[in-house]
Amino acid sequence: YAWIGWTILIVACYASLDEFHQSFVPGRTPAVRDVLIDTSGGVASQLVAALVLLPGRNRPRPSL
């Protein structure tokens, strides 16, 4: 399950860097709120991925 934590960390770092970049763009301002919105989207996607992928680990694999 470590991949879930690493993925959320990467999403949060990317969102933070994007907001930092926006501080240099005329007419744009960085916002912590946007980082939280982006990170919550990453959390939601990981929950969906976990619900889809993890239950399948216990199913027997079909023989060839």
Image (cartoon, helix red, strand yellow):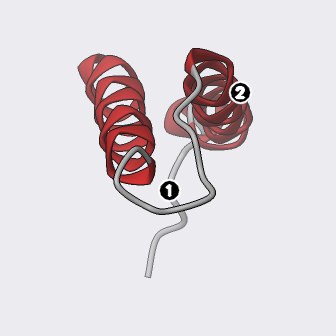
Q: Residue at x 40, y 44 (%)?
A: 23
Q: Residue at x 50, y 56 (%)?
A: 61
Q: Residue at x 34, y 17 (%)?
A: 5
Going by the numbered disc 1, the residue's amino acid type is Arg
Q: Which residue is mark 2?
A: 37
SS of the residue under disc 2? helix
N-terminal label among 2 and 1: 2
- Along the line of sight, the residue nearer the viewer: 24 or 13: 24
Q: Which residue is mark 1?
A: 61
**Can you say which quadrant of the picture contains the C terminus?**
bottom left
- Along the line of sight, the residue nearer the viewer: 3 or 20: 20
Where is residue 33 shown, x and y percent of the image? 68, 18
Label 2 crowd (10 A; few <14 / some 14-19 / many >=20):
few
In the image, taking residue 22 as reference, residue 40 lies left or right, namely right
Going by the numbered disc 2, the residue's amino acid type is Ile
* Mark 2 vs mark 1, CA separation in Å: 38 Å
Where is residue 28 shown, x and y percent of the image? 60, 52
Vertically, is 52 above or below 58?
Answer: below
In the image, taking residue 63 as reference, residue 55 lies left or right, namely right
Vertically, is 39 above or below 61?
Answer: above
Question: How many marks do you count on the picture?
Answer: 2
SS of the residue under disc 1? loop
Where is residue 1 shown, x and y percent of the image? 34, 17
Q: Which mark is residue 16?
A: none
